[in-house]
Amino acid sequence: MVDLSVEIGNLHLKNPIMPASGTFGPELSNVMDINLLGALVAKSITRDFQPGNPTPRVAETDSGMLNSIGIPSKGIEEFLKTTVREYSNFKSPVVASISAHSEAEFAYMTNALSIEQISAIELNISCPNLEAGGKSFALDSNLTEKVVKVAKNNSKKPIWVKLSPNVTDISEIAIAAENGGADALVVANTLLGMAVDSENFRAVLGTTTGGLSGRAVKPIILRMVKECYHSISIPVIGCGGISNATDVVEFMLVGASAVQVGTVTFEHPAAMETIINDLPIWCKRKNIKRIADVIGAITFPDREISGVMEGIR
């Protein structure tokens, strides 16, 4: 019997597989056994009602998907009243994901979500900080450290911080999040991109740009997970282009303690269940009794090339 369990700080997961925020809901119980999942990450919510972005919101790309959903939300009160009750029907730990435009909003929401039914809180810090002229928390190490510290001081739950890949040095932001008190990092959110309709001379998405996810981003996020793992001491959760059990293993080899699965669920709604069933097969083939032993187990050349430009020489 292969032991698929992993630890994210003090939180025990029966396996390393969980959905990425915004790609999962209780309705998936119609096509898969949700209780198999290591954790359930709910769709990001905001403090108040938020309608989301204008349509079109989604566009298919080569090996990926662009989205500009805009985090439509019924607000935290509705989440506490309805969504928490829906998720309590399942056995896996529930992770609430929150988005806010100010430190005060993050403080309020992390405090309100410090309830028994919530096992951890994921901070989506890619949103604009209205107190800093609209600059995203996730793009600035000082803003990241401050907002994480505020959230941590107002919560009794573990704080996971979802980083943005749209930065020059993600390890700098990772260190800032750890300094702020983060219990784990989710690496990473979507990459900024766009799609063009050349027949009609316009952008495909209603907001022109959106977040790129899916298989196309996997090599980039793998690199970022590796950089974060070697820069901090808290767990890293990989998120980006994971479609099968081999992808999961690759992310764990470079340092991820667990992973979040997103875009592939839109293609194959039961993909996460398939991945969970396939992981023990890989482990048995490699004579690995504990999947946790794979974390960070990759070996590198004696002289590891640092920096993109140096690698181009």
Image: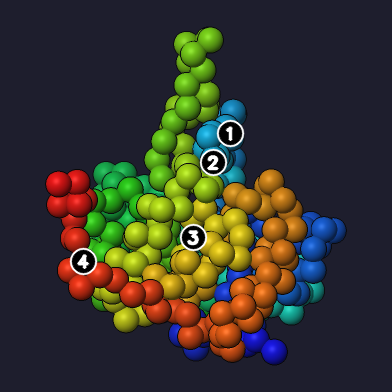
Which of the labelled discs sits on residue 239, or is there none? 3
Which of the labelled discs sits on residue 60, or is there none? 1
Disc 4 to disc 1, C-alpha distance: 36 Å
Q: Residue at x 60, y 49 (%)?
A: 263
Disc 3 to disc 4, C-alpha distance: 24 Å
Disc 2 to disc 1, C-alpha distance: 6 Å
Q: What residue type is labelled 1?
A: Glu
Judging from the image, what secondary structure is the residue with disc 1 in? strand
Q: Which of marks 4 and 2 is nearer the N terminus?
A: 2
Q: Which amino acid does label 4 sit on?
A: Glu
Mark 4, mark 1: which one is toward the viewer?
Answer: 4
Disc 2 to disc 3, C-alpha distance: 14 Å
Judging from the image, what secondary structure is the residue with disc 2 in? strand
Image position of 149 with respect to 43: above or below:
below
Judging by the rendered image, the residue that carries numbered circle 2 is: 64
Q: What residue type is labelled 2?
A: Gly
**Which is more toward the observer, 185 or 244?**
244
User: Residue 68 placed where, x, y %?
Assistant: 52, 38
Q: Which of marks 3 and 1 is nearer the N terminus?
A: 1
The residue carrying pointer 3 sits among few (fewer than 14), some (14 to 19) or many (20 or more) residues within 10 Å by Cα, namely many
Could you tell me if residue 303 is visible in this image?
yes
